[in-house]
Image (tube, rainbow, N blue to C red):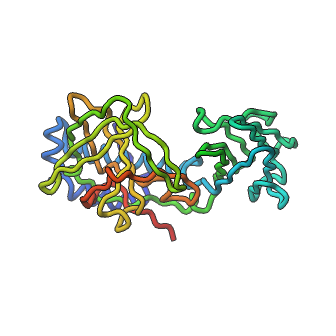
Amino acid sequence: MTMTLNALPVRILLPLGIALCGGLAAAAAAGESEGHSPAHYLEEIAEWRQARHKRLSSEDGWFTLVGLEWLQEGENRIGSQASSDIRISGGPDTWGTVIVQGDELTFVPAGGGEVTIDGAPAAKTQLIADKQGEPTVVRSGDLSFYAIFRESYALRIKDRTAPNLLAFDGVESYKIDPAWRFEARFTPAAAGQTLEIGNVLGQLTPMNVFGTVEFEREGRTHRLLGLGEDGSESLWFLFADRTSGRGTYGAGRFLYSDGMPEGGRVVVDFNKAYNPPCAFNDYSTCPLPPPENRLDLAVTAGEKDYHHD
């Protein structure tokens, strides 16, 4: 696997440079014990961060999210006109109408050829929301919207020329430190166990609990609940720690394990901890760490808080 660091912005290259120079000694024991070289481990994390930057800077990344508008039962007229029920600045005067009838959403285009649905010319279409599958995307130029369900239906509005996207030059991270990679113990949860997870809107959603992971740091045992959905290929951790609001995003961070547990063990690498979408825009509906995943530990690994001037 080949790594191309030249493509990375300065804000990413600087911490990576520190890691590649100062982290080799720390990586030696971890790298050799896992059967690959220290340099290979540093490359692996550097490439993971590069891929993360590419996703964030894409035309469909979280920086393009510029609005969240709640739909009402019945007709919802979409457009840039002041008379629109949902206004989208900069787009057509009239996109059309979203009709909500219980759990059925229908888009009726206004006509005129400016609007497409999943890349095809607009026609009357039943919209698929995110909870039902791949959402239907209604687009006009750089602007688009699709439906989401968070106890009721709403439209996420995106702009491929959003100022925050155009200004994005990377997320600062802690230097790569192999000491934050743990081969953690895993204890499976009882079959069917769930946990109510709150989000920034104050809503609660039940999530499957796969089990508990345990690892040692600073002479103490720390635990996290691993969450997921049917068919998950990794455990998902929503966690907060002593750095939350003091160098990292205040509402916590996300982390996935390296695959699913095998033989009662699973790799948890905090160098891959990253910010939730709410760190990058004001229109996301991010879940929040449960009390069980609030670590009494300063996790100085992974992404730091994102600040854009």
Question: Which residue is at 20% across, 28% downward?
Answer: 263
Give the image location of residue 273, x and y in percent. 35, 51
Give the image location of residue 202, x and y in percent. 52, 55
Marker count (numbered): 0
Q: Is residue 152 left or right of residue 307?
A: right
Question: Which residue is at 24% across, 59% downward?
Answer: 297
Q: Quadrant of residue 3?
A: top left
* Quarter of the picture holding the N terminus: top left
Q: Is residue 304 above or below residue 216?
A: below
Give the image location of residue 5, x and y in percent. 38, 51
Q: Quadrant of residue 256?
A: top left
Question: Which residue is at 81% across, 45% downward?
Answer: 75
Q: Is residue 40 left or right of residue 202?
A: left
Give the image location of residue 73, x and y in percent. 75, 45
Question: Which residue is at 42% across, 59% downward?
Answer: 251
Q: Is residue 46 left or right of residue 199?
A: left
Q: Is residue 251 above or below residue 157?
A: below
